[in-house]
Image (spheres, helix red, strand yellow):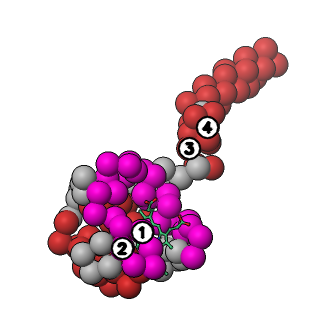
Protein backbone atom coordinates (compact mmCIF):
# COMPACT_ATOMS: atom_id res chain seq x y z
CA UNK A 1 0.00 0.00 0.00
CA UNK A 2 2.78 2.39 1.01
CA UNK A 3 4.42 1.76 -2.37
CA UNK A 4 1.33 2.85 -4.28
CA UNK A 5 0.98 6.03 -2.27
CA UNK A 6 4.64 6.87 -2.86
CA UNK A 7 4.47 6.26 -6.61
CA UNK A 8 1.24 8.24 -6.81
CA UNK A 9 2.96 11.08 -5.04
CA UNK A 10 5.95 10.88 -7.36
CA UNK A 11 3.70 10.87 -10.41
CA UNK A 12 1.85 13.97 -9.20
CA UNK A 13 5.13 15.74 -8.55
CA UNK A 14 6.26 14.98 -12.10
CA UNK A 15 3.06 16.38 -13.59
CA UNK A 16 3.42 19.49 -11.44
CA UNK A 17 7.03 19.97 -12.56
CA UNK A 18 6.00 19.63 -16.22
CA UNK A 19 3.20 22.17 -15.79
CA UNK A 20 5.61 24.61 -14.16
CA UNK A 21 8.18 24.19 -16.93
CA UNK A 22 5.60 25.17 -19.52
CA UNK A 23 3.89 27.98 -17.63
CA UNK A 24 6.73 29.83 -15.93
CA UNK A 25 7.93 32.68 -18.14
CA UNK A 26 11.21 31.96 -19.92
CA UNK A 27 14.22 34.25 -19.64
CA UNK A 28 13.31 36.08 -22.85
CA UNK A 29 9.84 36.95 -21.64
CA UNK A 30 11.17 38.28 -18.35
CA UNK A 31 13.65 40.45 -20.23
CA UNK A 32 10.86 41.77 -22.42
CA UNK A 33 8.80 42.85 -19.44
CA UNK A 34 11.71 44.77 -17.94
CA UNK A 35 12.08 46.79 -21.14
CA UNK A 36 8.55 47.29 -22.51
CA UNK A 37 8.47 47.23 -26.28
CA UNK A 38 6.15 49.25 -28.44
CA UNK A 39 2.62 47.85 -28.46
CA UNK A 40 1.49 46.75 -31.89
CA UNK A 41 -1.08 49.14 -33.27
CA UNK A 42 -2.53 49.62 -36.71
CA UNK A 43 -1.57 53.09 -37.89
CA UNK A 44 -4.50 55.51 -37.62
CA UNK A 45 -3.12 58.65 -39.26
CA UNK A 46 -6.16 60.81 -38.48
CA UNK A 47 -6.02 59.97 -34.77
CA UNK A 48 -2.26 60.49 -34.74
CA UNK A 49 -2.62 63.91 -36.35
CA UNK A 50 -5.17 64.93 -33.72
CA UNK A 51 -2.81 63.79 -30.96
CA UNK A 52 0.14 65.61 -32.51
CA UNK A 53 -1.94 68.80 -32.90
CA UNK A 54 -2.98 68.63 -29.27
CA UNK A 55 0.38 67.72 -27.76
CA UNK A 56 3.33 68.43 -29.99
CA UNK A 57 2.88 71.39 -32.34
CA UNK A 58 3.35 73.96 -29.58
CA UNK A 59 7.05 73.07 -29.70
CA UNK A 60 7.48 71.34 -33.04
CA UNK A 61 5.39 73.76 -35.16
CA UNK A 62 1.98 73.34 -36.80
CA UNK A 63 3.61 71.86 -39.91
CA UNK A 64 6.20 70.06 -37.73
CA UNK A 65 8.67 72.58 -39.16
CA UNK A 66 10.25 73.10 -35.76
CA UNK A 67 10.18 75.78 -33.09
CA UNK A 68 11.26 75.23 -29.52
CA UNK A 69 11.76 71.61 -30.58
CA UNK A 70 13.45 70.33 -33.75
CA UNK A 71 11.85 69.95 -37.18
CA UNK A 72 10.07 66.57 -37.43
CA UNK A 73 9.12 66.72 -41.11
CA UNK A 74 11.69 64.06 -42.03
CA UNK A 75 12.04 62.39 -38.66
CA UNK A 76 11.21 58.97 -40.17
CA UNK A 77 14.49 58.97 -42.05
CA UNK A 78 16.56 59.26 -38.86
CA UNK A 79 14.48 57.50 -36.20
CA UNK A 80 12.61 54.18 -36.24
CA UNK A 81 9.04 53.94 -34.84
CA UNK A 82 10.49 52.18 -31.76
CA UNK A 83 13.00 54.97 -31.18
CA UNK A 84 10.32 57.66 -31.50
CA UNK A 85 8.04 55.66 -29.19
CA UNK A 86 10.73 55.42 -26.54
CA UNK A 87 11.73 59.10 -26.88
CA UNK A 88 8.16 60.43 -26.69
CA UNK A 89 7.39 58.20 -23.71
CA UNK A 90 10.47 59.24 -21.77
CA UNK A 91 10.92 62.81 -22.99
CA UNK A 92 14.27 64.38 -23.86
CA UNK A 93 15.87 67.61 -22.68
CA UNK A 94 13.05 70.14 -22.23
CA UNK A 95 10.61 67.87 -24.04
CA UNK A 96 8.26 66.36 -21.45
CA UNK A 97 7.65 62.62 -21.08
CA UNK A 98 4.24 61.67 -22.46
CA UNK A 99 3.98 58.30 -20.73
CA UNK A 100 1.69 59.73 -18.07
CA UNK A 101 -0.53 61.86 -20.30
CA UNK A 102 -0.94 59.61 -23.34
CA UNK A 103 -1.80 55.92 -23.55
CA UNK A 104 0.95 53.56 -24.72
CA UNK A 105 -1.13 52.79 -27.81
CA UNK A 106 -1.52 56.50 -28.54
CA UNK A 107 2.23 57.07 -28.31
CA UNK A 108 2.80 54.02 -30.52
CA UNK A 109 0.34 55.37 -33.08
CA UNK A 110 2.00 58.81 -33.09
CA UNK A 111 5.42 57.12 -33.38
CA UNK A 112 4.31 55.09 -36.40
CA UNK A 113 2.75 58.17 -37.94
CA UNK A 114 5.89 60.26 -37.52
CA UNK A 115 8.05 57.40 -38.80
CA UNK A 116 6.23 57.63 -42.15
CA UNK A 117 7.54 61.19 -42.53
CA UNK A 118 10.63 60.81 -44.68
C1 LIG B 1 7.79 71.48 -24.48
C2 LIG B 1 8.11 71.40 -25.87
C3 LIG B 1 7.92 70.06 -26.58
C4 LIG B 1 6.77 69.34 -26.72
C5 LIG B 1 5.39 69.68 -26.18
C6 LIG B 1 7.10 68.19 -27.53
N1 LIG B 1 8.42 68.19 -27.84
FE1 LIG B 1 9.43 66.82 -28.95
N2 LIG B 1 11.17 67.78 -28.58
C7 LIG B 1 11.29 68.98 -27.92
C8 LIG B 1 12.71 69.33 -27.84
C9 LIG B 1 13.28 70.56 -27.19
C10 LIG B 1 13.40 68.28 -28.47
C11 LIG B 1 14.93 68.15 -28.62
C12 LIG B 1 15.40 67.39 -27.39
C13 LIG B 1 16.90 67.23 -27.33
O1 LIG B 1 17.47 66.70 -28.30
O2 LIG B 1 17.45 67.57 -26.29
C14 LIG B 1 12.40 67.34 -28.95
C15 LIG B 1 12.70 66.19 -29.66
C16 LIG B 1 11.76 65.37 -30.23
C17 LIG B 1 12.06 64.28 -31.11
C18 LIG B 1 13.44 63.85 -31.58
C19 LIG B 1 13.84 64.75 -32.70
C20 LIG B 1 15.21 64.42 -33.24
O3 LIG B 1 15.54 64.98 -34.31
O4 LIG B 1 15.95 63.67 -32.59
C21 LIG B 1 10.86 63.70 -31.46
C22 LIG B 1 10.65 62.50 -32.36
C23 LIG B 1 9.83 64.44 -30.78
N3 LIG B 1 10.41 65.45 -30.06
C24 LIG B 1 8.50 64.16 -30.88
C25 LIG B 1 7.51 64.80 -30.15
C26 LIG B 1 6.15 64.40 -30.13
C27 LIG B 1 5.56 63.25 -30.92
C28 LIG B 1 5.50 65.25 -29.29
C29 LIG B 1 4.03 65.21 -28.90
C30 LIG B 1 3.53 63.96 -28.38
C31 LIG B 1 6.47 66.20 -28.79
N4 LIG B 1 7.68 65.89 -29.33
C32 LIG B 1 6.19 67.23 -27.92
C33 LIG B 1 10.28 69.74 -27.38
C34 LIG B 1 8.97 69.34 -27.28
Q: Mark 2 and mark 3: span between their CA atoms?
A: 34 Å
Nearer to us: label 4 or label 1 = 1
Tell me which segment is drawn in magenta: 66-94
Q: Are circles 4 and 1 on residues that touch, CB within 8 Å?
A: no
Give the residue number, with chain letter if any, for mark 1: 70
Which circle, 2 or 4, is nearer the viewer?
2
Q: Identify the residue under disc 3.
A: 32
Q: How far apart are marks 3 and 1 (CA)?
A: 31 Å
**Disc 4: CA contacts within 10 A as few (<14), some (14-19) or many (>=20):** few
Of marks 3 and 4, which one's residue comes earlier in the chain?
4
Look at the numbered disc 1 and give the secondary structure of its residue.
loop
Proximity of marks 3 and 1: CB atoms separated by less than 8 Å: no
Residue 49 in percent (x, y) is at 23, 74
Compute the Cα span from label 3 to label 4.
Answer: 14 Å
Q: In which quarter of the image is residue 104?
A: bottom left
Spatial distance from mark 4 to mark 1, Cα to Cα? 45 Å
Task: Determine whether the residue tagged by mark 3 lies in a helix, strand or loop.
Answer: helix
Asked if residue 78 lies in the magenta stretch, the reply is yes
According to the image, label 2 marks what residue? 66
* Residue to which mark 4 is pinned: 24
In terms of depth relative to the viewer, which is nearer, 31 or 13?
Answer: 31
Residue 76 drawn at (x, y percent): 31, 53
Mark 1 C-beta closer than 8 Å to ligand 1: yes
Some atom of ligand 1 lies within 8 Å of the CB belonging to the residue at label 4: no
Residue 31 x, y percent position in the rendering: 61, 41
Q: In this view, does 93 lie to the left or right of 49?
A: right
Q: In this view, does 96 lie above or below 30?
A: below
Is 40 placed left or right of 36 in the picture? left
Quadrant of image for the N terminus: top right
Amino acid sequence: MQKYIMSGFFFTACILALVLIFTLPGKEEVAKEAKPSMPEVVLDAAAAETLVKANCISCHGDQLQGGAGPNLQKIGSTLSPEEIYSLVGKGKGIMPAFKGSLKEEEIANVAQFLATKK
